[in-house]
Image (cartoon, rainbow, N blue to C red):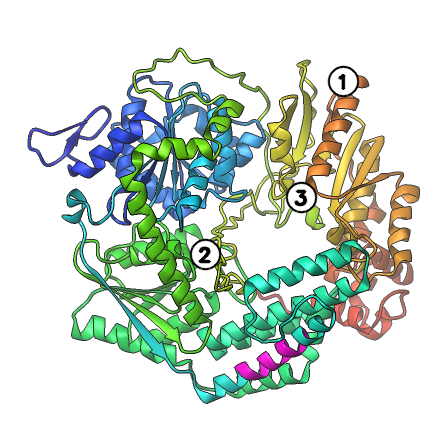
Amino acid sequence: MATTDEGDGVAGPLLVDGFLEDRRYQRELADAALRTHTLVCLPTGLGKTTVSLLVTAERLAGDVVNKSLLLAPTKPLVQQHADFYREALEVHDDEIVVYTGDTRPDDRADLWSGARVVVATPEVVENDLVGSRIDLTDVVHCTFDECHRATGDYAYNYIAERYHEQARDPLATGMSASPGDDEEAILEVCHNLGLRQVEVMTEEDADVDDYTHETSVDWERIELPETVVEIRDAINEVIEDRLGKLRELGVTNTSKADVSEREIQQIQGKLRELMNNDQSEGYEGMSLLAEVRKLRTAVTYAETQSVESLRRYFERQKQAARSSGASKADQRMISEPKVREAIRRAEDYDDLHPKFRRTRMLIAQTLGIENGERVIVFTESRDTAETLTDFLNEHFTARKFVGQSDTDGSDGMTQKEQQETLDEFRAGEFEVLVSTSVAEEGLDVPEVNLVLFYEPVPTAIRAIQRKGRTGRQTEGAVSVLLAEDTRDEAYFWKARNDQKRMKEELRSLKSITGEIESELSQTGMDEFDEENGAVESDPSAGDDGEVPHETEGETATESEKPSPSGSGSARSDGESARDGDETATTAQSSDGDGQAGLDAFAGDDSASDDAATRDEPDGEIATASADGEESVEVVVDQRELDASIAKDLSREEDVETRLETLAVGDYVLSDRVVVERKTVADFLDTLTGGDERSMFEQVKDATRYYARPVVVVEGEDLYGERNVHPNAIRGALASLAVDFGASVLRTTDEDETTELLRVIATREQETEDRTVSVHGEKSSKTLAEQQEYVVASVAEVGPVTAESLLAEFGSVEAVMTADAEDLQTAEGVGEVTAERIREVVGSDYDG
């Protein structure tokens, strides 16, 4: 890399001359990242993506077959990176492709084969690796943006493992402004991604200082109104009562409402031990603890958000308590007199949380007195985002910016709507962006004059991400609203201490970069390389590296559905649902102060953000067979990808996984064995009316095409997890075995299910010499079956009730035209079911 003759830009292989501003620190970081697998730490707004692009350009210049893969956690961020790469690289636009769940699986395979640069969400790449649709042999540079996410079982970890295993000449780069709260967390990220060194630039570095500006942080303390305190205290009394009962069970020594999250986790662990010993106190206590958690969330809404958000939350809880299969915790909480009184007082309260007025004042000061142009307000709760946007629009021009998933009482934003909103914000078409966590990471949000935290966030990483939206080009300001004597204070101290510790750790890491390799080796880097066949990247290396075996296989067409089949959702051909695409889950931590993050908010964007939906072809049942290699094949229904089973199987040397959208079963192990997997909770949902049609109809379908259908019931305590009579459970098991001829096998967890599937597949394909066959087109239903299907789908009454109704009335038409009183003459139809049927059939359509 070199500067242009004019000295104002960077020139190099595949770089558009003069497009990139020449910043010495970016070139130094890129040079370092070219030498080995590197974690690049650079403050927000200082061009981490440019560093990755410089490395990519050098690596791609070696050979036209070389590919680059850039992973980013959200679709808007993926699109932003792709646009930047198209502008900065001398690569044809068609060879820089976006690869997300919005792209059909068939198209993704074609895009991958013809691309030089792939910009993708990690979940989709993970799915396609599991399904053997793609391999990473030719990827010579893999970038993990916002790499601090590489913890737990996040998709980055699996992709990194497969990348170091498959690529002939791998080079990995992790990028983050905030890689972890301490050295241990940073080293964990490095280990998970196979990174060997850490390169740190801070705002104190001379080269960086020229491009940063001072950002002031003001903490605005807010006093709660008396009525809100009374509502909060009434809920806390119920929490103390439930904790008192838990204390009587001997699982805690406290009954204080401000019990820490750490203590709650300890209580849960003790209750789990009681349940494992089949002691009834464990189940009783777990129900009480579930109620405590819900009530604590209600307190958080009241204290830190708004009474309107609290009202919405309680309305969702009331609906849950009225639903079929409602838990005792839901029902007990809503029927508690003190909770009912708190709900009544919340409904009568016609004022706003004082944070609303303070937000308005701070924005007015920024936009009016100080002549600012733009403000971002961050909040944890989508309820608050929507209410606050409406409130601010009375005084300013404001828009909300939330995730893509729909929640109870709230519509998400499509990717197009998100992009249009950001474009309009950049263009100055409105002044205030009210956003949930979806805008925290990496999005090219324009320079703003004020970033306002509606509440403190409990982790340093998220606080740094939010503050990075200001102070890029001019001095910026951050204001944090803090409700006194509430959990806001705990989150404030936690985030403050974490940020201080993170800065110290980064300075420490920067000062001891020579020791980083030994630190990483001590955390298992050598073992990582040995296990995955990683080869140290060398910019001078050619294409001599050994090319791993590339699996050949059909690219399956996928249909999506709202939840994995393990959840018991009924399949519907052509139904749109999730393709395992990105979820903007932000990990929340808890430490000495015992306060976890605000991930408890029901329906908030911090929980689940992007569930892209679209129409897909019907479930595939095309024929396939083993190819004669020594490995066995397992065909996985793509809706099972929320479980770890498919990933674990794909890691096995003697197993090849392939994804299909199966109309029958979750796993196909041979031409005669299909497996339907149900967790204990899903199985019990079937018996409580939550999913009756799904399991029995799916098993019935399986018996039509496979001689040996298997039902795996996964989990412990089948007879104790719910208040379901043991004879009802035995009856369901007997029905599966006797009525449907299915084998019912029990496993304790996903690991045991994985091993069971591998053993069955090996036995079938190697010992019995059978092929894998996903059988031919599903036969048409008989007229009676179609009639039962239509009636069963009305208000989800299920197949048994549908047969009863048809037997009573003789036709679908007669069932649909019967009034509520007549419907109750059919066996198994009560007043509630009859009214629900009439509501569905007789109500006006409001699409």
Q: Quadrant of residue 197?
A: top left
Region rendered in magenta: 232-242
- Of 61 and 294, the residue lying toward us: 294
**Callout 1: helix, strand or loop?**
helix
- Labels 2 and 1 touching (C-beta < 8 A): no
**Which residue is farthest right?**
738
Q: Which mark is residue 766?
A: 1
Mark 1 or mark 2, which is nearer the start of the sequence? 2
Q: Which residue is drawn at 69% across and 38% down?
A: 751
Amino acid type for the residue under numbered disc 2: Gly
The image position of residue 227, as x and y in percent, is: 49, 88
**Callout 3: helix, strand or loop?**
loop
Mark 1 or mark 3, which is nearer the start of the sequence? 3
**Which residue is farthest left?**
6
Q: Main secondary structure of the magenta part?
A: helix
> Marks 2 and 1: which is nearer the front?
1
Using the numbered discs, state the Cα–Cα distance from disc 3 to disc 1 in whole angstroms: 33 Å
Would residue 631 be found to the left or right of residue 542 on screen?
right
- Labels 3 and 2 touching (C-beta < 8 A): no
The image position of residue 733, as x and y in percent, is: 87, 47
Q: Is residue 99 magenta?
A: no
Amino acid type for the residue under numbered disc 1: Glu
Q: Mark 3 points at which residue?
A: 573
Using the numbered discs, state the Cα–Cα distance from disc 2 to disc 1 in whole angstroms: 47 Å
Q: Residues within 10 Å of mark 2 (few under 14, many from 20)?
A: many
- Labels 3 and 1 touching (C-beta < 8 A): no
